Image (spheres, helix red, strand yellow):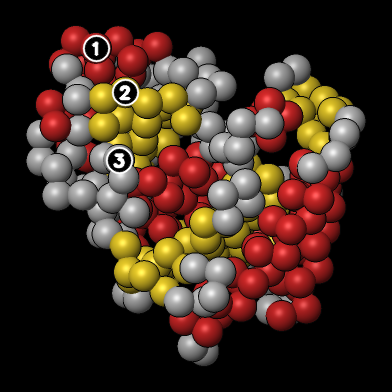
Amino acid sequence: MTGDRMAMMRAVLGIARRAATVIMEVYGAPFEVDWKAKDDPVTRADREANTLICDALAAAYPGIPIVAEESDPASYAGYAGAPAAWFVDPLDGTREFVARNGEFAVMIGLAEGGSATTGIIVCPATGRAFMGAEGHGAFEVAPDGSERPIHVTPVATLAEAELLVSRSHPPPQLEDAAARLGFRKVTPCGSAGVKATRIAAGEADVYGQPGRAGALWDACAPEALVKAAGGKATDASGRTIDYAARELPNHHGFLATNGLLHDDVIALLRRFGTPQPGDKPR
């Protein structure tokens, strides 16, 4: 994608903030919960935010496929062969939204040449907003538009590290490994987006989800933001995630760290039986 990357990030952040407003309007009143599948809730907030984001991206950046969780797959057919694609999770952490614990996020990621390059994440319940792009750095953006550079932590040992794990789907292999090896702290947290912002902002050190870890729209914005903040993100086996893949599910997990701890965490996951490429999803 050509043009001013910072201007594009600010524009997309504006779209995400508008979606966050819609989400909070639903959050503040009684709402119904539907089920796409067992343990996979969806609400009016998911659908309305999805429509708003997709319409706005299509108008601002015509011709770029938009792979969005609540969209008809036919609308983004052929994305794998496109030079760039948006990956949108309009309400990441719907279970947390339903539980009303505030741990949910709007996520818009851009992948170019199959790599995550730009990430926008807004946390509607707290109002925190983040953006980052390869080669441009990562920022927390205040409501008045002021931008504060953010960076991952300098923590270099697992014993000093805080590990974030899924609140809804805690990974037993990782929690067992953490207990044995003595992470300084293990914190359950909802939403991949919320966890990624904490890693990028230097508020925690490791986020790991072995096994099945959602889909490409759950990974693109978090990966781009963490990398822009100086960290590292891969699948749980250490492989680069391919956003030009024809399969959307992340069968081999997701791992985001401050970079310094990445290899140690991968070794830990292998030691304690985390699924590796070629294993059946658990």
Look at mark 2 in the image and give the residue it sits on. 186
Percent from the top left, x then y, of residue 30? 87, 34
Asked whether the residues under the numbered discs 3 and 2 touch, taking CB atoms below 8 Å apart as contact, a structural biologist would say no
CA distance separating discs 1 and 3: 17 Å
Q: Earlier in the sequence, mark 3 or mark 2?
A: 2
Q: Amino acid at mark 3?
A: Ala
Residue 179: mark in rendering: 1
Percent from the top left, x then y, of residue 5? 47, 81
- The answer, for residue 9, to whether it is visible in the render is yes
Q: Earlier in the sequence, mark 2 or mark 1?
A: 1
Q: Nearest the camera: 94 or 259?
A: 94
Above or below, 93 relative to 233: above
Q: Amino acid at mark 2?
A: Val
Residue sitting at 75 percent across and 50 percent down? 23
Look at mark 3 in the image and give the residue it sits on. 204
- Residue 263 relative to residue 62: left or right: left
Q: Earlier in the sequence, mark 1 or mark 3?
A: 1
Asked whether the residues under the numbered discs 2 and 1 touch, taking CB atoms below 8 Å apart as contact, a structural biologist would say yes
Percent from the top left, x then y, of residue 62? 73, 79
Above or below, 45 relative to 181: below
Q: Nearest the camera: 280 or 24?
A: 24
